Amino acid sequence: MFNVLVVDDEPLICKGLSSLLASSGLEIGHIYTANSGFEALDCIRMEEVDLLVTDIQMGAMSGIELMQHAKLAKPWVQTIVISAHETFQYAQMAVRLGAKDYLIKPLNSEHFLDSVRNVLLKMDKPSPELATFMAGIGESFRLEEPLPEYSKLLNALIEEPASVMGEEEKLRKLDELKLQGPFFSVIKIKLPPPEAAGEKKYTSRDRELLRYAALNIAKELLDQEWCTVAFYSPEEEITVIIQWDERTYEESAAGQINRLDVLGRSLHLNIQKYLHLNAVIGISQILKGLSFMDVLNRQASKAIQWNKEHSDYYVFYYGDFNWSSYAADPSAEELYTHNNLIVQKAKAYIDENYAQKGLTIHEVAKKNHVSPNYLSYLFKKNTGHNLWEYVIKLRMEDSREMILHTDLRRYEIAERVGYESPEHFSKIFKKYYGISPSELKK
């Protein structure tokens, strides 16, 4: 059963779509509704949501912004966008963020349910090639090496670009691969020994198939919205080169690192889901020019090495580690001190700003110069609870004190602890304490 969240700033639309879904006969467990982006984001953080159906134009947070924050919180959440305007720019942005459909109001009921049905049907299914592999037809499965004539060239490019850049024929081949950039990032996927997942002994053929399946998963995820080249590298790694042209990069330069983080987590989650392996993902920074490809390659490889220090964490962004502060790789003690400092600073920032409307994990992470994913991991590891749970804890404790010891009205208390509507505040309060604000007051 799948859980669906419907978001629209018009309550009647939320109610209508919820009723339509409830009577559709689809495999839907819970249907949640929200009337703003911030309310929806709280729901995504606190509930198990599989599909987000959102209006694109809403008050303080648009549907596009909601999609961005939702993907950061839970990369596996799928999205269908609805809009009153057939605007190409909105549709293009929605597709880039992975929207599965873009529907125009007024909605056709049959069309809407078909769209939801298609998304839910595909949600648990791998690609046809991967499905064949997973069915266990190992011996008859025919492997087709990805870009075999270029693998050697691509590995040479990411290791020693200078040796490749001067040869006209090689540059022509690179152009055929559409490695034009000019902005690039490198992602490394390192598969663990399959034996680590259980007692089964894997043959070299099994390992070859697992690697091929992992590449298939990566290509399926990447082909939807990224301009990429994926290929095999030494040490049984898979390398992915991601690129942006000038216009695409400038459109959302500030958000590209977050999107890479989401992609890394999606790669890990899908490889774990279908192959039952905890792949380690290393993500480089973004640099301009093919001549920096060896730098990006080293960054992605170095990021992967941090799995030795964080064995329960699998997606590493090079920029999360303050390399320039150390003459050599930091010791375990230095790393522990540095991580504690990040958490202390994040906690101090939240203590001071928890009542701010529109506060996001992204904002807290930005103040610490780390990715939201890594900050969330460190915060949970060091404090024992989720970062957003800590924000809610402070808001709820503060509001409880005001309810018990002041004559402030519900909307005033909601305003003071960072909620844009008293209804949203009451919903969170009741979920947290088990009773409504008015019941507590009595």
Image: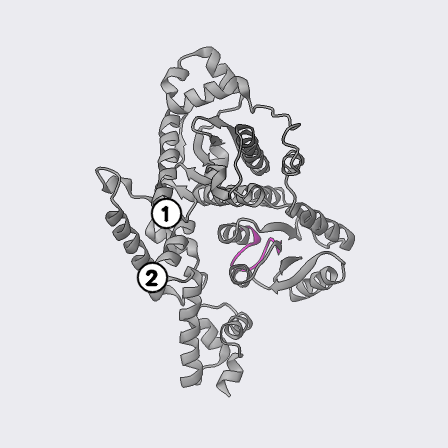
Q: Element at badge 2?
A: helix
Report the number of numbered marks.
2
Residue at 25%, 52% (x, y): give it. Answer: 337
Residue at 57%, 43% (x, y): give it. Answer: 93
As drawn, which residue projects farthest toward the left?
Answer: 327
Q: Is residue 333 above or below residue 352?
A: above
Question: Which contiguous range is marked in magenta?
Answer: 54-64
Residue 58 painted magenta: yes
- Mark sitting on residue 347: 2
As drawn, which residue projects farthest toward the right?
Answer: 110
Q: Element at badge 1?
A: loop
Name the foreground residue: 275 vs 247: 275
As drawn, which residue projects farthest toward the bottom?
Answer: 442
Q: As drawn, is 23 to the left or to the right of 391?
A: right
Indicate the position of residue 159 as horizontal and vertical percent values: 38, 23
**Amino acid marked by disc 1:** His
Residue 57 painted magenta: yes
Residue at 44%, 31% (x, y): give it. Answer: 184
- Mark sitting on residue 310: 1
